[in-house]
């Protein structure tokens, strides 16, 4: 459906559509992770693991370098 309707939208709006879809996925996944506990109690271990995962991803992203291509 996206392939068919995508031809009718302004390409400059693509980042906004991706942000909305990404936000929807984050919302659904966070509800699944944090609301899956018995009596909906806060599980600090899960929160700690999520913070650790986000921190690790940020560190890897910040210090990742691509090899430089040498031109002749």
Image (tube, helix red, strand yellow):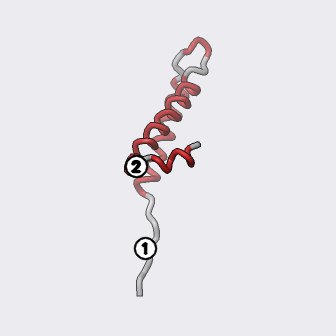
Give me the C-alpha separation between circle 1 and circle 2: 34 Å
Q: Is residue 46 above or below residue 13?
A: above
How many marks do you count on the picture?
2
Residue drawn at x 44%, y 42% is 17
Q: Nearer the viewer, residue 13 or 15?
A: 13
Q: Nearer the viewer, residue 15 or 26?
A: 15
What residue is disc 1 on?
Answer: 68
Residue 64 appears left or right of 35: left
Residue drawn at x 44%, y 53% is 61
Q: Is residue 42 above or below residue 61?
A: above
Residue drawn at x 56%, y 15% is 40
Q: Quadrant of the C terminus?
A: bottom left
Residue 39 appears left or right of 21: right
Where residue 37 sits: x, y (%)?
A: 60, 19
Q: Please tell me whether mark 2 sits on a helix, a strand or a loop.
A: loop
Circle 2 packing at 10 Å, graded few (<14), some (14-19), many (20+), is few
What residue is disc 2 on?
Answer: 10
Residue 17 appears left or right of 5: left
Where residue 2 sits: x, y (%)?
A: 55, 44
Where residue 54 sits: x, y (%)?
A: 47, 41
Q: Quadrant of the N terminus?
A: top right
Q: Please tell me whether mark 1 sits on a helix, a strand or a loop.
A: loop
- Sequence-first tag of 1 and 2: 2
Can you name the residue that lies furthest to the left here? 12
Where residue 7 sits: x, y (%)?
A: 49, 50
């Amino acid at each position: 459906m996206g392939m068919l309707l995508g031809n009718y939208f302004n390409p400059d709006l693509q980042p906004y559509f991706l942000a909305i879809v990404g936000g929807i996925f984050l919302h659904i996944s966070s509800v699944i992770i944090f609301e899956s506990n018995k009596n909906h109690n806060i599980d600090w271990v899960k929160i700690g693991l999520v913070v650790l995962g986000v921190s690790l991803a940020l560190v890897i992203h910040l210090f990742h370098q691509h090899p430089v291509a040498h031109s002749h």
